[in-house]
Amino acid sequence: MPKSPTPTPSNDGTKWATFTYSSPQIRKITSIFKHTNIKIAYKCSNTISHLSKPANKTTLPTTPYDRSGIYMLTCMTCNKAYVSQTSRSLKRSYKEHTHYIKSNNPQSAYALHILNNQHEYSPIEKTMTLLKPLKNTSLLTP
């Protein structure tokens, strides 16, 4: 669907509207303005500058903790595991869990376990494991 035109008045009082020419159907849409004082101008989106731009390269995460997906947190004292999922980075989820522990706030089951049992938690490398990385976060359970 084309963008709504923004009429701009010219010096002689004629208003102009610009449409991006995306298909021949745009001519049918703009024919509505034939009997008005609004003139139509077309622009295209496939100019040389658009076509010569390099494609956006997505950088791959450098560590597994920069990815999203299904993860497991393990209690280093009793080896019980907490499995969860996140659409954000695992690093950020780990920081939230440790923040809950440090602030004595049992917002997650992992924090609740550590706080109730007075167990110790370890650095992310020893505690957190990425079980299944996901590129498409819509596959996560809501």
Image (cartoon, grey):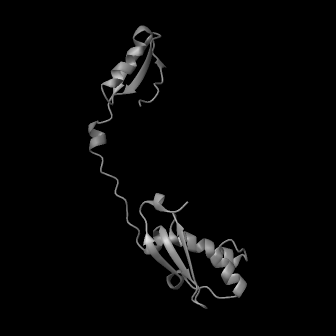
Between 85 and 122, the residue placed more toward the observer is 85
From the top left corner, tell me how far across and down residue 37 is, in percent: 45, 10
Q: Which image quarter is the C terminus in?
A: bottom right
Comparing 24 with 36, the one in front is 24
Residue 48, compared with residue 84, is above or below; it is above
Residue 10 in the image, given as x and y percentages of width and height: 45, 15
The quadrant of the rendering that contains the N terminus is: top left
Q: Nearer the viewer, residue 99 or 27?
A: 27
> Relative to 87, is 118 on the left or the right?
right
Q: Quadrant of residue 113?
A: bottom right
- The extreme front residue here reads 141
Residue at x-position 47% and y-position 68%: 69
Residue 53 x %, y %: 30, 46
Asked if 14 appears above or below 1 in the picture, the reply is above
Q: Residue at x 51, y 85 (%)?
A: 126
Image spot of residue 47 (x, y percent): 28, 36
Which residue is found at the position 41% from the left and 29% from the top?
2
Number of numbered callouts drawn: 0
From this view, report whether residue 25 is shown above or below residue 91. above
* In the image: residue 26, left or right of residue 48: right
Q: Residue furthest bottom?
A: 77
For this view, does 99 lie left or right of residue 58?
right
The part of the image, by quadrant, that contains residue 35 is top left
- At a point 70% along the width and 74% down the height, the residue shown is 106
